[in-house]
Amino acid sequence: MFLWRLPQAVCLVWLCVSLTVGYEDNIEVSFSDTYYNEITEGEPVEPTATPAPCKTSDLTKWDKLFSMLENSQMRENMLLQYSDDIIKVELGSLRGEMLRFVAQYGGACGVAVESAGRRMSLQMEARLRESMEHLRQERSIAVGNTAGNSVNSHQETLLQQLLAASRTQASRLMKLENSCLTNPRPITPTEANSRDLQQVVALTEMLDAVVTELGKTRAVLEEALKSAHIRHLPAGCETAILFPMRSRRIFSSVTPDLPLTLSSFTVCLWTKPVSVANRTVLFSYGTKRNPYEIQLLFSGTAALFTVGGEAHLVEARGVVKGGSWTHLCGAWSSEQGIASLWANGQRKASTPGVAEGHVLPSGGTLQLGQEKIGNVVVHGSHASGSQVSGFEGGFDANLAFAGKMTGVNMWDRVLTGEEISQLALQDGDGCEQRGNVVGWGLTEIVPHGGAQFIN
């Protein structure tokens, strides 16, 4: 069996080998590329024909102009678009900043507006009420001049209008506070972003309008208070002497508390002249022998001070102004003969050797608003004795004072600069500092010929 199968197996193996060899002989593998445009050596190369370019007609000047306009329009559109994008970004950033500002400072701003507005309105109303009260007091003064009454009425009307304006501003501030303080707690960023930017702009405009109106009201109020302050008496004085006109019959006589046998003195007074055109006597003391022992006067805008006669003169120029209160002081010491003249608390002039060693004699006449050049009146009675030549003419209307005078005081010593400066403060209490020779409000002062005390 095995021997029979062995030849069969050999035959089968031979057959398989034969078939394999025959199949490999029939397959030819080609590794070369089959290109049909391959250039062979020796053949001439034919150039490829280049197509002719498109023929275009020449552009006219209108075509060029339209092209330039199109290019310009495109660039303009690009710039506008770029600018619009920048503005949108900047406005968005600004809105964010404003909302953050409102969120951070909204509460503090409201509290500040509330306190400042209330304080300003209270101060304005208090000052206005005070000014109106002073004007009501002035209305009771009989000055014998209808023009003064009309001015008072005008001032009171003006202050009434200012008071109404102040109340209006207070109501506006209250509305602003209510609008600004609707939510007193701090605003969160979420709440701030939900608010419209127009509300912030409206509040800002309202604040600007209120500040502008308050500035205008303050300016008018200051002007009215300045005018009313000029009409009031200075240094806390409650009374003054009114000299209504220049007249030889209008003056005030003074009876001093001490004899005027003095080797030093200081005399001070407040004066408000109607005009400063002519030589005018304010304070005068004289005797039969010498009617010019003491004189405090002004000529034009210059203040003059003499002791022992006009040969000893101290002058300060440009210190007196018509229609305004001016504080004048004259001081003199016999020991060194130094005379000084003070105006509004400042020493304006000083002269040595003025009546050095001189002592003022007693028995003379002390007067305000005039100087005695006739029969001497001593303490209200005529003095006996012969008259001095040139001393019998009475008063001179050209030297008479017209205006108001208050705070007349005289001391038997030379006051210090600090004391005189305190007396010259218009808002101070100088009228409470009274002299020991003549004290305003204590010493007997008698008006004559139409002069009168006013409150």
Image: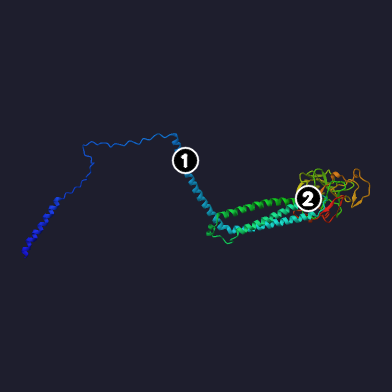
Q: Residue at x 8, y 59 (%)?
A: 10
Which amino acid is tagged 2?
Answer: Ser
Task: Determine the residue positioned at 7% across, 62% down.
Answer: 6
Picture layout, residue 109 above or below residue 397: below
Identify the amino acid type marked 1. Answer: Ser
Dot 1 alpha-carbon crowd within 10 angstroms: few under 14, some 14 to 19, many 20 or more: few
Image position, residue 116 (x, y; %): 64, 57
Return the residue nearer the eye: 455 or 132: 132
Q: Nearer the viewer, residue 250 or 65?
A: 65
Separation (CA) of disc 1 from disc 2: 75 Å
Q: Position of residue 366 (x, y in %)?
A: 86, 50
**In this rendering, the label closer to the viewer, 1 or 2:** 1
For label 1, the SS is: helix
The one nearer the camera, 13 or 421, is: 13
Q: Quadrant of the N terminus?
A: bottom left
Which sits in the foreground, 64 or 342?
64
Is 271 rendered above or below residue 1? above
Mark on residue 8? none
Q: What secondary structure is marked by label 2? A: helix
Query: Is the C terminus in the top left, top right, bottom left or bottom right quadrant?
Result: bottom right
Query: Label 2: how many residues lie within 10 Å, few (<14), some (14-19) or many (20+)?
Result: few
Circle 2 sits on which residue?
Answer: 150
